[in-house]
Amino acid sequence: MTDATLPSPEPGERLPVDDAAAVLEAAATAVDAVAEQVDADMDALDVPRRLLLVHAHPDDETIGTGATMAKYAAEHARVTLVTCTLGEEGEVLVPELAHLAADREDGLGQHRIGELAAAMEALRVKDSRFLGGPGRWRDSGMMGTPANERADCFWQADLDEAVLDLVAVVREVRPQVVVTYDDRGGYGHPDHIQAHRVTVAAVEAAADSSYAPELGEVWSVDKLYWTAVPKSALQAGIDQLKAAGDSSFFGVDSAEDLPFGIADEQVTTEVDASAHLDAKVAAMRAHRTQIAVDGPFFALADNVGHRAFGIEHFVLARGPRGRGTGPLDREGDLFAGLGLDDPVLDAPIG
């Protein structure tokens, strides 16, 4: 007998003992489910600062926001990462793993799940998820490639479904701050562009009481940020690498020749997480199929100095702008202006 088929007594009639017990058990189960949800909601609110980052592929989180994630994790903020694809179309930079490539065994995505888990351990981030579950959306490849046309790729995703899945996370985690890419996807990758679209729509929908009430209480995100790299920082890295005799930074002489980077005056926020650069570098090493130890990112970490590579930049797209410092009046904290308690600090990882 299932809950749906429990008998209803006629007026004045008593249920048999077994049926009555089943009714009580079903009621108790329902009460327990509600209590568990309430406890989860209260646990989320017990952590004063909550940060949600939405990235396209494993390794994107480390390259663009790894030091920031490590900093806030060390300060006991709740840091949640949502990754939209497994990165199946990525280039395999480790010769002995070349068979995993999409045009061979197509096993790279499953392998990168483990790389991401190792990176999160390095950053001390405990809450890492895939949008819709691992493998729900496939890496779309670079813009203009045949991989863009696959029905299961993120570029072709049903936006209603993807937004619904992300709203569920937003309402569960209740972040004050959400980070993703700008509408160009940083450098034009279709999955980055789609991550932007899904995130913006989900932030709006999560605050709408008429949208999917079954997903829980509405939640309004206070601040929405885009990741960013100021052109001055790119140029400084190029110049310092050249001075050190290293021309590995994408083979260019000018930041203007790169498909990413924004004008300095557009950057609103500069998070100095240089004390956690060792964690970022360890996370980069975890993504071994994607980030070559002799490539531009490790070269930057080695040559431009720990402080420079541990500073990450953002553009405030929505929400209150906190008090800035320096000649460009930039915020130094993603939670600035929200009036939250000062963090409790752990020692930097390393």
Image: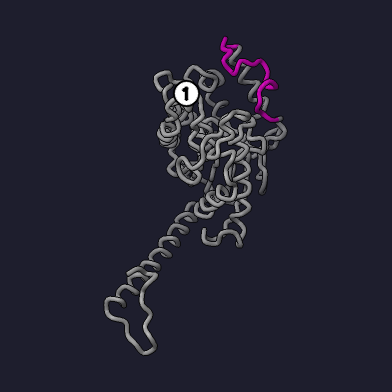
Residue 246 figure quarter? top right
In this rendering, the answer to whether 349 lies above or below 234 is below
Report whether 154 appears left or right of 14: right
Badge 1: residue crowd in 10 Å (few <14, some 14–19, many ≥20): many
In this rendering, the answer to whether 130 lies above or below 240 is below
Does the magenta-highlighted stretch encompass residue 226?
no
In this rendering, the answer to whether 233 lies above or below 37 is above
Spot the residue most to the top.
245
Of residues 25 and 127, the one drawn nearer to the viewer in this rendering: 25
Q: Position of residue 258 (x, y in %)?
A: 66, 23
Residue 44 seen in this snapshot: yes
Residue 19 figure quarter? bottom left
Report whether 26 appears left or right of 346: left
Q: Which residue is mark 1?
A: 92
Q: Residue drawn at (51%, 29%), measured in percent from left and top?
A: 89
Does the magenta-highlighted stretch encompass residue 255?
yes
Of residues 75 and 287, the one drawn nearer to the viewer in this rendering: 287
Q: Quadrant of the N terminus?
A: bottom left
Q: Residue drawn at (53%, 30%), measured in percent from left and top?
A: 63
Q: Quadrant of the C terminus?
A: top left
Image label count: 1
User: What is the image's colouring?
Assistant: one colour
Q: Which range of residues does the magenta coloring cover? A: 243-262
Q: Residue drawn at (65%, 45%), measured in percent from left and top?
A: 322
Q: Position of residue 271 (x, y in %)?
A: 58, 36
Q: Amino acid at mark 1?
A: Val
Label 1 residue SS: loop
Q: Position of residue 24 (x, y in %)?
A: 33, 74
Residue 74 seen in this snapshot: no
Spot the residue most to the left.
17
Q: Position of residue 15 (x, y in %)?
A: 32, 82
Main secondary structure along the magenta-highlighted residues: loop
